[in-house]
Image (cartoon, helix red, strand yellow):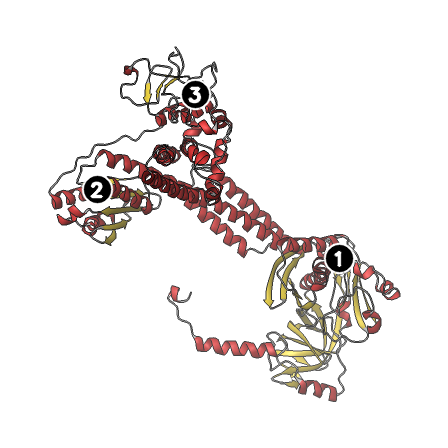
Amino acid sequence: MGEERGLKIDMDAYEAARKQAQLISQGGGKGVDDQINLDVHAIADLQGRGVPPTDDSPKYDYSAASADPDSVYEFGTCQGRVVALRCDKQFVQEVPSGRECGILLDRTSMYAEQGGQIWDEGYMTKEGDEETEFTVKNVQVRGGYVLHIGSLAGTLRVGDTLNVFIDQERRKQVMNNHTGTHVLNFALRRVLTSEADQRGSLVAPDRLRFDFTSNSAMKSDQVKQCEQIANDLISRNGEVFAKESPLALAKSIQGLRAVFDETYPDPVRVVSIGVPVEDLQADPSGPAATQTSVEFCGGTHLRRAGHIGPFVIASEEAIAKGIRRIVALTGPEATKALHRSAALENQLNVLSEQLNDPQLSSKELVRRIVELTDEISQATIQQWKKDQLRAELTKMKKQLDDKDKARKAAVMTSVVEETKAFVTANKELPWIVRRLEAYSNTKALDAALKQVKAIAPEMSALFLSVDEDAGKVVCLSAVSKPALAAGLKANEWVTKLTELMGGRGGGKPESAQAAGTNVTAAEACLEAARQHARTTLGQDSQPVEVQVPTASNAAPSPASKTAKPSKASAKSSSKSPAASSAVPSSGPVLFCGSGDPRALLCHIAAGYSGLSLPVTEAPAPDAVPLGRRPTLRTADGTLIWDAAAAALHLAPAQLRGGADPASEAAVLAALFQADELRQLVAGWLAAGAPAQQSAASRQAVEQWLERLDTVLRDRTYLVGERVTLADLALSCALLPAFTGGLDGRQRARLVCVTRWFRTVVHQPPAAAILGEVKLHE
């Protein structure tokens, strides 16, 4: 991280600081200067001079004004006489102003760090001299002596009397978290039963930390349950009782919690929430202690559990093998966490609504999801809520990924079909240069080049695409063997464009690619590519533009349901409704030979539009001048040739892909593929077909189905979230394969395709035409 910012790390200084930190941690008082702290020699000196241990009982001298959850706490006053002053590793009689030192009083109300509870902070003033003030930064206890550590303003001598003032707000928050620690211990026992033995704790003003034994991480619902149990105990607002008890009697109380392997004094202080300690002593075998929190503890606690306020578990994590750590918040800090949680949840709801905003790109939405995920991960909120929000964002991200995959698949299909139609119409050309709407999808351009090689092996091609949202222009080229012999090289071809597109490229003489950022240079790049091909090969190329069919914009006119299309059973699925010689006078009519399987799709499309579609033979050859059947005559007399085009005209907008151009293109591509697939299936299953031809067709169909199975792994339909002509056309083409070719063993390898096929043929308009489709066994 430092190198990324051009920084260097002073490792020697780091190692020195690390060793110093280790020494400080071994000293037993965080950040306590060894020049001030009490060591064994200092304690022996005090004991030898007969200095009694510090009376710190005033630390418990406080009360709550009321039982209300927001009650104010009142702390008693305390005076203490200076019995010792310590600095520079020795006891002194006087300390001048501005020095860091340690003060021992005969009596104090400040809490020294012990039992997991952090020290008190505050200040002391000299009796009779308010200008002399000692700021208390740390309080430690050694051998019963409470040492106040801080900085002095004014002169102080042994024997002076000091007024002690604790930081009351800080102490109140510490008490919040200490009583909250006991509540958490009780809640953990209820959720994890006997697994959760305490292994340590820290009680600070802003948080509490609790370490416990557990063989596995807590699940999110367990964390939530634990937090709920803690809040339930707090809401009962039971009084917090504290009383010293003989150690043996205290240990006999059933349900009392103690730290494993800890040595306790005798007598020991017992803290109980909601049940007087006297009652527990009177009936130690009773169930009372199992229904609330009862622990050994010498810390300062609230007078009532309800004064804790809201309780929030902010994190749960491992710190060692078999040891977990919970960090929790109470009072004001918990309230902040709850407010932050609500704000983040609101942000997520807003983002969820933005998923359907057409003005926002998928890339922008993904960026916002990632940013919000990072924000939630770093936020101090409930752990279970954090897991819940991140799970929702993961789900949203998957939805966008699925849509992006579908969009790319649609782009791929559209580009391939457009190229297929274009190259088929221009097979004789020596080279082509063309812009395709593939955005920055180089796989789509590569698939288009493969179409060129398959349809016109002697043709060379360069395809270019622009993605304005991504600020990227890409091109791919492939050169045929005759063109290579004539001097055209793919890598030189794309290199001619790199300067114009503001990028770079390269490859082999047979194939190459380039990419750049100048999205405005598309036309200039195309012209430069054409000029290079003309100059190198000495041949021009004037392609014939092919209009790829699109769905008709005109909605079919309503027609009365005067005739219902007959159902075709699975065994006669290649038969369309019987043809008649009579031509109806109004409404759409399908001119179709008897039993033409291509008519099935037209009837299903008409069924979705609520149209009746009579079938008849053409009364005269001029009714189908191009000789293409099925042919649709619309209500206004227009003739539409070919089953795919007729189905597009008859289908409602939702079957055609809606208003989304990419979806419409994907549907159109599937219609082309369906015709090719239908011929392959017929070549496989045709009666009397040569065995070699049948085997080749069967292999082609199976390969086709394997690819389709992969496409359908993460989607229900081929285009979008609803059935379209893409599904219907391919299902009709595969109908003979499923009813007369693929057995159960083969379908078991095509789980996704089989699920999709059964879904499509059971759609009511499709079932009305196809009837009951029985799969081949």
x, y percentage for residue 138?
Answer: 64, 73
Q: Nearer the viewer, residue 759 or 109?
A: 759
Residue at image mark 3: 577
Specify few, some or many for label 2: CA neighbours under 10 Å numbering under 14, 14-19, or 20 or more.
some
Q: Is residue 526 left or right of residue 617?
A: left
x, y percentage for residue 581?
Answer: 37, 13
Q: Nearer the viewer, residue 198 or 656?
A: 656
* Residue lying at the far bottom of the rendered structure: 48
Specify few, some or many for label 3: CA neighbours under 10 Å numbering under 14, 14-19, or 20 or more.
many
Q: Give the mark, 2 or 1, whose residue is nearer the N terminus.
A: 1
Q: State yes or no: discs 3 and 1 in contact (Cβ < 8 Å).
A: no
Q: Amino acid at mark 2?
A: Leu
Classify residue 465 by image quadrant: top left
Classify residue 381 by image quadrant: bottom right
Cα distance, mark 2 to mark 1?
Answer: 77 Å
Cα distance, mark 2 to mark 3?
Answer: 51 Å
Residue 689, placed above or below residue 179: above
Residue at image mark 2: 526
| Residue for point 21% across, 50% down | 510
Camera sees residue 391: yes
- Disc ID at residue 305: 1
Q: Amino acid at mark 1?
A: Ala
Residue 280, placed above or below residue 556: below
Q: Is residue 668 left or right of residue 252?
A: left
Secondary element at image label 2: helix
Q: Amino acid at mark 3?
A: Pro
Kindly report which numbered mark, 2 or 3, lies closer to the viewer in this rendering: 3
Q: Nearer the viewer, residue 333 or 320?
A: 320
